Image: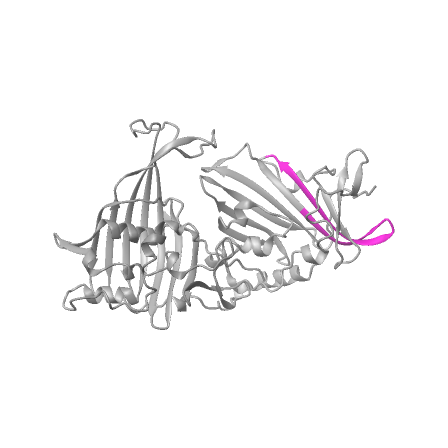
C-alpha cells in the first residue's frame, strides 16, 4: 500500500529563524511570572492544549505601476477567505498538533468549505512524525520527510504551539483589551498561515487584540498593506503570463477553546463500517479480481475558472489487455494512447479509430516477465520494436508491476454523498487518486503534487465495478480544472482497432 509521508509544509523557511531557539514544549513554566496576573493561568492552559478555529481574509489589489497609483484594468480586486482548524497538545508524554486548512466559498447564501491540506503530527525524538489513517483503515505512524528525503526537525515546520513562543510581557493592556506586539504578531501569523498560497513574508500588523476568559480566548489581527517588491505573474483568461503589482491586506479572527483539555492525538482513529458503503466494498473487491480493463483519463484545465483553450482537453488511455494471442503465441499486453479532445466532445465518442505515432504497446510472454516496448511506424502501418525512445520502461517492468491493483483498499475510509457517489475522508483526499486509482504509467502534475480538492467515485449501473471518478484540482497561480478517470471494458480490454505488429 502506497502512502505519501512528506509534509505539505515545505514552504516554512520564513519562520525558521523565529522558532529555531524555541524549546519543544516539554518545559512550559519558565516564562510564566506573577501567578496573580489574570491572564497568566490562561496562558498556562494555552501552552498545554487547545482547539483553534481561525478565519483569514486576504484581499489582493492589482496595479499597473510600481508606485501603486494606477489600478490594473485587466484584474479585479480579489478577496479570498480561509479557515483553519487546529488542535494543539503539549503534555509530558505527547507533543503534537492536528491542523486542517480550508478555503471558504460562498454558494448562494451558504458557505462551503473546500479542504486544502492538513496532517496530524507529533514530536518523535525531536523530529516531525505523522499519525494517519491509512487506505486500509488502519492508524499508522511514520517519521515525515522533506522533498530531499531528509528528516524534518519538529521545531522547524510551524508545528510548535505558538503560545510557547509568546511571553507574558508580549501582551500589554490598553483601553480594556490586551494587545500583542508587532514582532510576535508576525510570528503568530506565520506559524498559523504560512502554508497557504496567499501567504507573504514580512507582513506587519497595525493591531492584534486579544480577549481572555477562563474557557475562551479570541483574537483579531489586522495587517498593514503589503506591496509586492516586483511584478508577479497573475494569469488572465486571455494571457496566462500577465504580470502585475500586487498589494496584500490580511484580516484574521481567532477563537481558542478547550483550554488545557484538548487532545490532538485522539483525533486519528479507525472509521466504523457503514452499511451504505457496501456497494463500494463489493465494487472494489470485484475490481481487485479483474485481470484486464481500460483505464481512461481526461483533463480539462482552467485559468481563474475560465477554460484554458491553449492547453485544451487531453486524454490518456491505458488498456491492460491481459493475455492475447499474437502471431500464434500468447502475450500479456498493455496499450497506451494520448490524444486531444474537443472541449464539448463526449469522452468515449472521441476514441481514436486508428493508432498514432504517440501510441505504444508493452508486451511480455508471462504476467511476471519483463515487457518490451513497441511503437507505431506510420510507414509500415504497424508496431515495431522500440529502438530507445522508451528505454526508461522497456524490459524493466512486468504486467504485474504496472497493473493497477485495488487490493487492500477499505471502503470504510469513504463517505457516501447525496448524489450517490463516494468520497474519501479529508486526510486521504490529496493523494488517494494518485496512490490508488492511477497506474504508474500515467502522470498528471496537479494530481501528483496533491492539489486535489474533490474526489467522487461513481459505480456502474449494476454497482459491480467503478465506472468513473470525478476529480477537481486547484494549483497555484490561478490554475485549476477537473479530471475524469473512467474504467471500461472490464474483462475484455483493448483499443478500438486491431494491433498489427511488423
Looking at this view, is 395 or 55 the one in front? Answer: 395
| Residue 46 vertical position relative to residue 370 in the rendered view, above or below | below
Looking at this view, is 471 or 434 the one in front? Answer: 434
In the image, is 36 to the left or to the right of 58?
left
Q: Quadrant of residue 158?
A: bottom left
Magenta span: 318-342
Q: Position of residue 319 (x, y in %)?
A: 70, 49
Q: Position of residue 410 (x, y in %)?
A: 56, 64
Q: Residue furthest bottom?
A: 93
In the image, is 60 to the left or to the right of 315?
left
Q: Residue furthest right?
A: 328
| Image quadrant occupied by the C terminus | top right
Q: Position of residue 474 (x, y in %)?
A: 47, 45
Magenta-drawn stretch, dominant element (helix, strand or loop):
strand
Q: How many marks can you see? A: 0
Q: Residue at x 24, y 62 (%)?
A: 216
In magenta stretch: residue 325: yes
| Image quadrant occupied by the N terminus | bottom right
| Residue 216 vertical position relative to residue 372 in the rendered view, above or below | below
In this rendering, does residue 263 appear at all? yes
In this rendering, does residue 112 appear at all? no
Q: Position of residue 162 (x, y in %)?
A: 30, 58
Looking at this view, is 198 or 161 the one in front? Answer: 161
Q: Quadrant of residue 406?
A: bottom right
Amino acid at each position: 500500500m502506497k502512502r505519501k509521508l512528506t509534509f505539505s509544509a515545505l514552504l516554512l523557511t520564513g519562520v525558521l529563524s523565529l522558532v529555531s531557539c524555541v524549546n519543544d514544549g516539554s518545559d512550559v513554566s519558565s516564562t510564566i511570572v506573577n501567578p496573580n496576573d489574570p491572564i497568566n493561568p490562561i496562558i498556562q492552559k494555552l501552552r498545554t492544549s487547545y482547539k483553534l478555529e481561525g478565519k483569514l481574509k486576504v484581499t489582493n489589489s492589482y496595479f499597473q505601476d510600481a508606485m501603486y497609483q494606477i489600478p490594473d484594468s485587466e484584474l479585479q480586486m480579489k478577496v479570498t477567505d480561509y479557515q483553519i482548524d487546529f488542535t494543539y497538545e503539549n503534555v509530558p508524554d505527547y507533543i503534537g498538533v492536528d491542523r486542517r486548512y480550508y478555503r471558504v466559498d460562498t454558494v448562494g447564501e451558504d458557505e462551503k468549505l473546500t479542504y486544502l491540506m492538513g496532517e496530524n503530527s507529533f514530536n518523535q525524538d525531536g523530529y516531525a512524525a505523522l499519525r494517519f489513517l491509512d487506505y486500509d483503515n488502519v492508524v499508522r505512524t511514520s517519521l515525515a520527510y522533506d522533498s530531499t528525503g531528509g528528516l524534518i526537525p519538529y521545531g522547524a515546520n510551524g508545528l510548535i504551539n505558538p503560545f510557547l513562543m509568546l511571553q507574558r510581557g508580549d501582551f500589554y493592556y490598553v483601553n480594556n483589551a490586551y494587545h500583542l506586539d508587532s514582532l510576535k504578531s508576525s510570528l503568530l501569523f506565520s506559524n498559523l498561515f504560512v502554508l497557504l498560497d496567499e501567504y507573504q513574508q514580512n507582513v506587519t500588523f497595525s493591531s492584534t487584540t486579544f480577549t481572555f476568559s477562563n474557557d475562551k480566548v479570541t483574537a483579531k489581527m489586522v495587517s498593514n498593506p503589503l506591496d509586492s517588491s516586483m511584478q508577479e505573474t497573475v494569469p488572465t483568461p486571455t494571457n496566462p503570463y500577465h504580470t502585475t503589482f500586487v498589494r496584500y491586506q490580511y484580516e484574521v479572527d481567532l477563537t481558542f477553546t478547550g483550554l488545557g483539555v484538548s487532545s490532538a492525538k485522539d483525533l486519528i482513529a479507525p472509521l466504523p463500517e457503514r452499511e451504505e458503503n457496501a456497494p463500494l466494498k463489493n465494487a472494489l473487491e470485484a475490481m481487485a479480481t479483474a485481470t484486464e480493463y481500460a483505464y481512461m483519463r481526461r483533463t480539462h484545465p482552467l485559468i481563474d475558472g475560465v477554460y484554458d483553450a491553449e492547453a485544451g482537453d487531453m486524454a490518456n488511455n491505458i488498456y491492460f489487455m491481459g493475455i492475447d494471442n499474437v502471431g500464434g503465441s500468447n502475450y500479456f499486453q498493455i496499450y497506451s494512447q494520448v490524444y486531444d479532445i474537443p472541449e464539448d466532445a463526449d469522452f468515449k465518442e472521441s476514441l481514436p479509430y486508428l493508432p498514432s505515432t504517440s501510441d505504444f504497446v508493452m508486451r511480455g510472454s508471462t504476467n511476471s516477465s519483463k515487457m518490451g516496448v513497441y511503437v507505431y511506424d506510420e510507414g509500415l502501418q504497424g508496431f515495431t520494436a522500440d529502438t530507445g525512445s522508451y528505454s526508461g520502461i522497456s524490459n524493466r517492468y512486468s504486467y504485474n508491476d504496472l497493473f493497477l491493483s485495488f487490493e487492500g483498499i477499505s471502503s470504510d475510509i469513504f463517505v457516501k454523498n447525496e448524489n450517490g457517489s463516494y468520497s474519501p475522508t479529508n486526510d486521504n483526499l490529496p493523494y488517494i487518486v494518485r496512490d490508488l486509482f492511477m497506474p504508474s504509467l500515467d502522470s498528471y502534475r496537479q494530481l501528483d503534487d496533491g492539489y486535489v480538492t474533490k474526489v467522487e467515485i461513481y459505480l456502474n449501473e449494476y454497482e459491480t465495478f467503478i465506472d468513473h471518478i470525478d476529480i477537481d484540482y486547484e494549483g497555484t497561480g490561478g490554475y485549476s480544472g477537473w479530471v475524469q478517470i473512467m474504467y471500461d471494458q472490464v474483462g475484455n480490454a483493448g483499443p478500438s482497432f486491431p494491433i498489427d505488429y511488423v
